[in-house]
Amino acid sequence: MITLELDPNLVKPGWTALIIVIVLALILVGLFLSMMRQMRKIKVPRAGAEAGDEGAGTPADAQQDEATEDPEEPGSEQDRSRRQDSTT
């Protein structure tokens, strides 16, 4: 490691370094507050929540609901098979 021989009387802490540290601390506080605001917006399902509550399902339940097709939805398999039966 290279060490510089500096006169301790000439090198001393300055206002610039202090201002940089204070600005960085303020930026970190702002980021923390913003993160906390965003975390409050997240809806986490609670264990033991009633079935009627919004967001009570698990992520697996949501995927299963999306994957299940409505039998009366146009374009579903049952609708297509009904149309084929009625045309023949």
Image (tube, grey):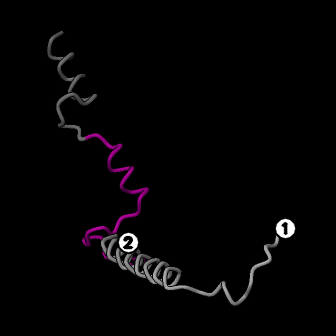
Q: Residue at x 48, y 78 (%)?
A: 20
Magenta stretch holds residue 58: yes
Furthest-left residue in view? Answer: 86
User: Residue 15: percent from the left, percent from the top?
Assistant: 49, 85
Q: Nearer the viewer, mark 2 or mark 1?
A: 1
Which amino acid does the dot numbered 1 rest on?
Met
Residue type at mark 2? Val
Query: Is residue 84 shown left or right of residue 48?
Result: left
Give the overall secondary structure of the magenta segment: loop
Q: Quadrant of residue 79?
A: top left
Picture coordinates of residue 45, whole percent (x, y): 37, 71
Q: Quadrant of the C terminus?
A: top left
Q: Looking at the picture, does residue 7 appear above or below residue 70?
A: below
Instruction: Quadrant for residue 37, please give it.
Output: bottom left
20 on left or right of 80: right
Residue at the spot of label 1:
1
Dot 1: element: loop
Q: Is residue 18 magenta?
A: no
**The residue tagged with tag 2: helix, strand or loop?**
loop
- The span picked out in magenta is 45-69
Q: Is residue 4 above or below residue 10?
A: above
